[in-house]
Image (cartoon, rainbow, N blue to C red):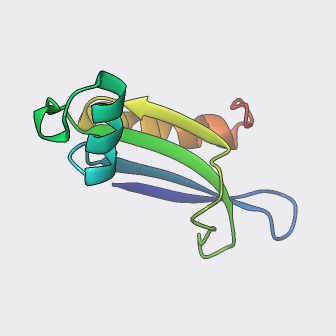
Amino acid sequence: MGRSIVATYWPGEYYLVSTTQEDSATPLRMFLRSVALQVPFENVPHEPDLFMTRIFNCNKQGSHKASEKPLYERQYSTFLEALNGHNETVDLFMKGHLKLD
């Protein structure tokens, strides 16, 4: 839904700002909720999907290691919030106003 590559003034230093929809009905998420709620897997209540913006180190094509921990994460509950949040995150990051882990 949102993907931006940000180049820095250092040669070869790039960051990927990625905003995605996280499906709450995947088996792994259902299992984790089942454990957290201490209910059988088939009785886990449905939760709405989440939207996440994450920042990763990347190359100039935007590729990053799937196992890499994000440098920044932000969560949204609606598509519109996520869309606006992605643009805001890119803007703040480019201005140097975003603290990364």
Q: Is the C terminus in the top left, top right, bottom left or bottom right quadrant? A: top right
User: In the picture shown, does residue 98 fall above or below 53?
Assistant: above
Q: Position of residue 81 (x, y in %)?
A: 32, 30
31 relative to 66 in the view: left or right: left
Q: Position of residue 6 (x, y in %)?
A: 65, 57
Quick one: which residue is furthest to the bottom in this view?
A: 61
73 relative to 87 in the view: left or right: right
Q: Is the N terminus in the top left, top right, bottom left or bottom right quadrant? A: bottom left
Residue ID at (25%, 38%)? 79
User: In the picture shown, does residue 22 fall above or below 38?
Assistant: below
Q: Count the numbered circles shown.
A: 0
Q: Nearer the viewer, residue 71 or 97?
A: 71
Q: Position of residue 54 (x, y in %)?
A: 54, 45
17 relative to 7 in the view: left or right: left
Quick one: which residue is furthest to the top in this view?
A: 37
User: In the picture shown, does residue 62 fall above or below 90?
Assistant: below
Residue ID at (62%, 39%)? 72
Q: Nearer the viewer, residue 38 or 56?
A: 38
Q: Nearer the viewer, residue 45 or 93?
A: 45
Quarter of image, res 96: top right
Q: Position of residue 75 (x, y in %)?
A: 43, 32
Quarter of image, res 89: top right
Residue ID at (62%, 48%)? 70
Q: Nearer the viewer, residue 79 or 97?
A: 79
